[in-house]
Every structure is written in C-alpha cells, then in structure tokens.
Image (tube, grey):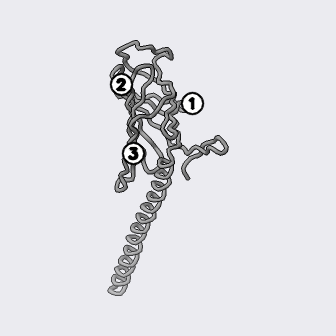
Amino acid sequence: MKKALIFTLILILTFSGVWGQTRVEKKIIREEKAKREYLKVKQIIESKSFLFFVNRVTINTGSSISIVGEGYYLNLKKDSVNTILPYFGVLYSSNGYRDGGGIKFKSLAETLKIEYDDIKKRIRLKFSSVNLGERLEFEVLVFKNGEANIMVGSIYRTAIYYSGKLYRINEEINDFSVPE
C-alpha cells in the first residue's frame, strides 16, 4: 500500500512538472508569434502604402452595424488618403454633403503622426484631411494581428468608429494582401 502511494505521488509530481512546462512553452510560442505578427504589421505601416477594409461601424450611441463585403475602406499611400466610408450619425452642417453624408474623398493626409507601442504591440496613426471645407480628424489604432479601430471626427458631425483589417498594397500588380 505504501509503495502504491509513493508511486502515485511520483507520477503526479512528474506529470505536473510536464504540464507546467507545457504551459510555459505554449506561452513562449504565443509571445513569439505575436512578436512576428507585430513586426509584419509594423513593416506595412512603415511602407506607408496600405489599406484598411472596414467591416463594422459603431455610432456614438453604441449601436454597431456590420458592413462586411460592402467595399468600404480607408487607403493611405505616402502622404495622401483615399476613403469611402459610410456615415450614420448627426450632421451639424449641410456643408456640401453630396454623397448622402458619407465620408468619400481623396486628399492629402496632413500632420501624419505614427506612434509605436512595442510593449503592447500596437500602432497609433493620427492625421487630418480636408474635404469640401470640412477638416476630418482620423485616429487609427492597429493591433499586432492587423485588426484596426478607426475613429473619424469633425466639428460638423458626430464622431464615428469603424473596425477593420489592415492589408498590404502590392503596387507592382495593383493588388493587396493580408499580413502573413
């Protein structure tokens, strides 16, 4: 009986050490994968030639609308921005909104500022742009896996939030691809 108890304790201690080691190894593997993903996303951002496809809109009341497959995007290329985004909110001025109040334009990305948070593995982009006399303020938070949250604000309308995914633009074949 004593031998069986000792044998059982030895087995438990042996396997608990293996399980603990497995968790540590899994954590290390997850951290290495996150670091690789973040470095790829960072390279795309540094190229200043990328696209965010938007799949969800959140208005200031907290309501969320899925727009998957609708073709809405924010494209940043060098110092210019090209965007087609829906707008569901309050317009305070009818300052020439010919597209039903949506955010659709091509313009310069003024005051582009990129902040890297290597510890939390995320990147923040801030820039403004002028469209038909309206100054739009953009703030984009890109996570290590390429997911992004985009906030657009203006004095002429309530702020609106978008969620999407970062894509690399391949200029040679005029195509885009997901970060690997």
**Which of pointers 3 and 2 lies earlier in the amino acid sequence?**
3
On residue 71, the disc is 1
Q: CA distance from mark 3 to mark 2?
A: 20 Å
Above or below: residue 64 compared with residue 168: above
Is residue 54 something that shows in the picture? Answer: no
Say which of 6 and 72 sits in front.
72
Residue on which the image places disc 3: 114
Q: CA distance from mark 1 to mark 3?
A: 26 Å
Q: What residue lies at 42% left-to-right and 47% top-to-bottom?
A: 143
Q: What residue lies at 48% left-to-right and 29% top-to-bottom?
A: 107
On residue 154, the disc is 2
Of helix, strand and loop, which one carries label 1? loop
Above or below: residue 162 compared with residue 104: below
**Which of pointers 1 and 3 lies earlier in the amino acid sequence?**
1
Q: Amino acid at mark 2?
A: Ser
Q: Residues within 10 Å of mark 1 (few under 14, many from 20)?
A: few
> Residue 14's image quarter?
bottom left
Above or below: residue 20 compared with residue 60: below
**Extreme residue in the bottom direction:** 3
Q: What residue lies at 38% left-to-right and 37% top-to-bottom?
A: 111
Q: Residues within 10 Å of mark 2 (few under 14, many from 20)?
A: some
Q: CA distance from mark 1 to mark 2?
A: 23 Å
> Residue 119's image quarter?
bottom left
